[in-house]
Image: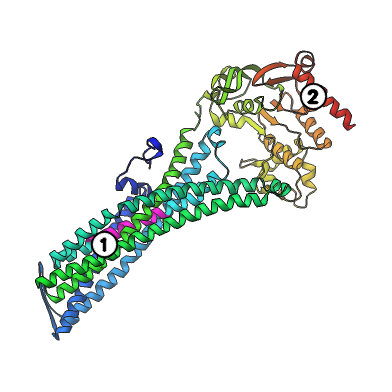
Amino acid sequence: MILRRMGTGGTRPRASAWSSLRPLLGDRRSSIVGLALSSVLSGITEAATLALVAQVAATLVDGAKRVHVDVGPLHMNEAIGTLLALALALSVVRLILQVPISLLPARIAAQVQARLRENLFDAFTRASWAVKSRDHEGHLQDLVTNQVTQAASGALQATALLVALLTFLVMVISALALNVAVALIVLAAAIALFALLRPLNALGGRVARALSQAQMNYAGEVGEAIRVAEETDVFGVAAVQRSQIDRLVARTRDLFSRTQLIAGLGPNVYQSLVYLILVAGLAAVYETGAGQFGSLGAVVLLLVRAGGYGRQFQSSYLVVRQTLPFVERVQDAERRYLASSPFAGAVPLTRVETLAFKDVSFAYLPDRPVLSKVSFKVAGGEAIGIVGPSGAGKSTLVQILLRLRAPDSGRYLVNGDPAEQFAREDWQRRVACVPQEPRLLHASVADNIRFLRDLDDAAVQRAARLAGIHEDVMGWSDGYDTIVGPRADAVSGGQQQRICLARALAAEPEILVLDEPTSALDPHSERLIQESLAALKGELTLFVVAHRMSTLDMCERVLVLVDGRLEAFDTVDRLRLDSSYYRSASALADGVSVAKS
């Protein structure tokens, strides 16, 4: 289910009708065949019913008791009652056929929606951190909601298009059997009109593509507004924010209005022109005097119904064209995520004994390196501090350590071998991190510590004790069942950070990376965490990114990064002598400590 890649200039090569419909209909061949068969049978029963009704009506006008018809292969001499019974039976059959004609499209659309969402989220979870981190606020949320919903609507309309097309053909073929001249005129006109309206269809696709992008922009701004809601209130900029959102709403409204206008205008124009052509065809038949009244009435009924199905086909085709940009956006995102999926590795990793960088360099933009030829080696069980000014490359170094990013050049070695060769699942079982900004699920404390892993209560409580949060949790009325998470009540920032620390410790990792682990803690909690981490020394390899110099007291060596380069890597005592940055940072920290005391 892969659409063609974007061509030059950001436009796609023109696809065939089937290749456009295939992403919407998917691989539901049995359902599509069943829908097609039901549509054809429904069309045949409807056409036969209309023809019978027209012939019976004409016979009743003449005052006769039996219907005599000789039209092409049709030879009929039956009582009116018999034909009415046959028409009734055909109507019942057509009624029954409406069940699969209604059920199968709903099932196909639901399956398309579910498949798109499953595939997209699966691809997102497999994507590299480098790609995930570049997504705007609300990007994935809008993809799996608005964009996929529009795509599912397209799937529904694609099935409606199939039904309308097949039924239209059945009506026209039936009319041909009764009156070739009129039927051919209307059929040729219908095809010509569809071709005539192609520019309108293309315009609908372009407007829909702009609407898709506008919805993504709107979702991104709303997501960002939610994230900075506290700052918005504090700085009193809600009015400016509303103005920005209002502009996006207006843009989306205008584009949505245009798509609806095009979706309604095309089919209505089509239907009106078909009627004009039908009247002209009947006038031509009248002038020539060809055809019987009964058969001509049947032709008129059939062609009127054909015109209705043609209108439905035109309407569905327009909607399908308008939903294709949403399908393309979802599938483009899926391909982008999957293409970035990092190499999973195949070599089992039993234990991490050493970690090393060899001339590791990394840049987000060309000619603007964030890390430049960084080299160091750490033995298993060491406690390592990482310090440096803002923008020195500490976060990037940590992300490479965690295998969230790969070096642009140089090598990252684990036990002396390239890190990427080791099985990612083995690596993930042995590594944990605590981000500077705590991120909690809206769930219980216990579930936040488990974090979707199969961990028992003993492991949860052990980790909570190590993180210094157990006593706090036991003091809450619901204990470990207390609901915490974004904007949850009665949970301080320090408590959230300690819950995240407990989460990192729960699976007993071999490598633990902490980004400012004590930045939001009071002195008492800071001391508890430092004592816990000190007790873990030797049991795991610890990396601590710190601005508080007191946090480094537990570290055996400290890595100093300045402007993306490794300025020094030594013990605290040696750094006080050899590292100018470390000396100045320590002096500043000592001054702040004295001022506070």
Amino acid at the residue labelled 1? Thr
Amino acid at the residue labelled 2? Asp
Q: Residue 417 versus residue 117: which sits nearer the camera? A: 117
Above/below status of 289 relative to 389: below
- Circle 1 residues within 10 Å: few <14, some 14–19, many ≥20: many
Above/below status of 416 relative to 396: above
In the image, residue 307 lies at what x, y percent?
26, 65
Given this view, does label 2 or label 1 mark the residue nearer the observer? 1
Q: Inspect the magenta stretch and tell me whether residue 104 lies in it.
A: no
The image quarter containing residue 224 is top right
Q: Are marks 2 and 1 in contact (CB under 8 Å)?
A: no
Q: What is the number of the mark on residue 167? A: 1
Instruction: State the residue at coordinates (69%, 16%).
Output: 567
Q: Residue 241 versus residue 493: which sits nearer the camera? A: 241
Above/below status of 157 relative to 496: below
For marks 2 and 1, the one nearer the N-term is 1
In the image, residue 377 lies at what x, y percent?
65, 17
In the image, residue 181 lies at what x, y percent?
13, 64
Which residues are the magenta region? 153-169
Looking at the image, residue 161 sits to the left or right of residue 549; the answer is left
- Characterize the magenta stretch by its predominant secondary structure: helix
Q: Inspect the magenta stretch and tell me whether residue 157 lies in it.
A: yes
Q: Which residue lies furthest to the bottom in this view?
A: 63
Instruction: State the residue at coordinates (37%, 48%).
Output: 26
Q: Residue 272 versus residue 567: which sits nearer the camera? A: 272
Q: In which quarter of the image is the C terminus?
A: top right
Q: What is the number of the mark on residue 413? A: none
In the image, residue 76 lies at what x, y percent?
11, 74
- Whether residue 70 appears in this view of the structure is yes
